[in-house]
Amino acid sequence: MTADLVLFRNARVLDGRHDTGLEGHDVLVEGGTIREVSDRPLTAASARVIDLAGRTLMPGLIDCHVHVIATIPDLGANADLPDSLVALRTAKIMRGMLMRGFTTVRDLGGADHGLVMAVREGLIDGPRLVICGKALSQTGGHTDYRGRYHARDVGHYATKLGAMGRVCDGVDAVRRVAREEIKAGADFIKIMANGGVSSPTDPIAFLGYSVEEVRAIVEEAQNAQTYVAAHLYTDAAIRRAVECGVISVEHGNLVTAETARLIRDKGAYVVPTNVTFDALAKEGASLGLPPASVAKIEDVREAGLNALEILRDAGVMMAYGTDLLGEMHRHQSEEFVIRGRCLPAIEVIRSATVNAAKVVRLEGKAGVVAPGAFADLIVVDGDPLADLSLLTGQGRHMRAIMIDGRFVKDELAA
C-alpha cells in the first residue's frame, strides 16, 4: 500500500549516529520523505498512526558490494546467458534484497542504467541501485572469463547484461572505456586491480593494470566528479591502488596495519565482504563454481576476519558488503553476524547505515532516520544492538519494510 502520511509512534530509533537506540521517538513520513523526528509526541490529522510499542525503527539497510546480475556462480557461463533471462532473474534477486530490508545497493560490476530505470519506474520491485556499469579488467584479469583455451574477442562481453566486466588494455583504451561507462550512466568506476577467486587465469597475488593505467582511470573518474573502486586482496595491491588515487577498497582481506593507516590517511575506505567466502567454501562447488576457483577461496577466507580488526584499529571507515553470487544471495544478511564476532554491534550497524550512505554518496538522504531523508525504513522486533541475528532470516524479524514511503511489507496493526 501507499500512504501519503504515516506517523510511527513510540519507536526505538537506531541508525548508527548514536551508540545506542533513541527510545520513545515519533517519526512522521510524508510521501517519500521523512518530515519530522521527535522525542515528543507528534500529531498529523490525516496520518495513519502506527504504535511501534518500543520496536526498533531503522533506516533501510545499504549493501555497498553486490552483483545483481550474477544469477549463477559460474560467471563465465552467466556472461553468455540471454539478456532477457538475466534481466528476469535479476528482478527476482533484487526483490529478495528488498525483502531482507536492503533499500539501497551499490552494484560492483554488471548492472546497467536500464535496471536503474526499471527500479525508478516501478517495473522491478527492488532497492535503489547505484552502479559502476561494467567493471574494467586487463586481459587475463578478474573479469576475463575466457579461460586459457578460449580466444573469443573480448568485445563480445561489452554489452552482455550477464557480463560483470569488460576487458581493456593500455592507457588510451582504459580512458575510452571509463568514459563510455560514465556516458552510459555509471555513478563510479570499478577496476580489477588484483587476482580473484571466480576468474580462471589470475592467481590472487596478480596485480591488475599498470600504475599508469590505474592513474589514467582515476583521472577520468575525477574529471567526471566521481571515484574509483577497486577489487583488491593483497597488501601490495591495496597499497599501490590507494597511492594511485583509488578511494574504495573492495574486500581488503590481506591488508597490513601499515597499509590500513595509509588508507585512513588518504581518506579512502574499505568494503569487506566476508560472507561470500563462507558461502563459496560451503556451496560454491555444488552450485557450479569451477574447481580452479574453489581452490582459491582459502587464500583469502580466514584473513578476512583478521582484516576487520586491523582496519578498525587503524581508524579506517568500513561499509557493509556481501559480493554474493547466484543462489548464495540468500546469505546477504549473514554478514552482520560474521562481523559481529570481531566488532561491536553498533559498528556493524554503522557499516550498513551512515557509513554506507557516504560510500553511495547519499549522505543525509539514506542510512539515517532524519528530517529530509528518504522514507526508507524497517521495523525490527527486538534490539539489533543486543542481537545482530535479528537482521537475518530473510527479513522474518522485520515487521515492516518501507521504501520511498511505500510499504513493501506491512505486518503492523492498523
Image: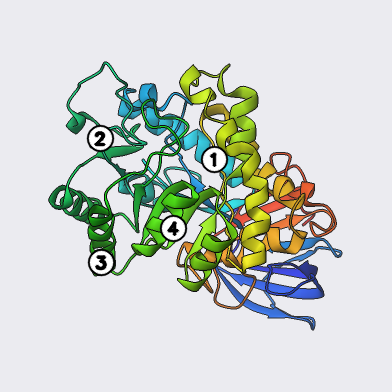
Mark 3 in CB contact with mark 2 (< 8 angstroms): no
**Mark 2 burial class by Cα count in 10 Å: few <14, some 14-19, many 20+:** some
Is residue 200 visible in this depiction of the protein?
Answer: yes
Q: Earlier in the sequence, mark 1 or mark 4?
A: 1
Q: Find the distance from the CA under tag 1 to the CA under tag 4.
A: 37 Å
Residue 139, which numbered label?
2
Residue 239, which numbered label?
4
Under mark 4, the amino acid is Arg
Q: For mark 3, what is the residue?
A: 224
Q: Who's the residue at 31% across and 54% down the image?
A: 186
Q: Earlier in the sequence, mark 3 or mark 4?
A: 3
Under mark 3, the amino acid is Ala
Marks 3, 4: nearer the viewer: 4
Under mark 1, the amino acid is Arg
Residue 95, which numbered label?
1
Q: Who's the residue at 81% across and 63% down the image?
A: 52
Mark 3 in CB contact with mark 4 (< 8 angstroms): no
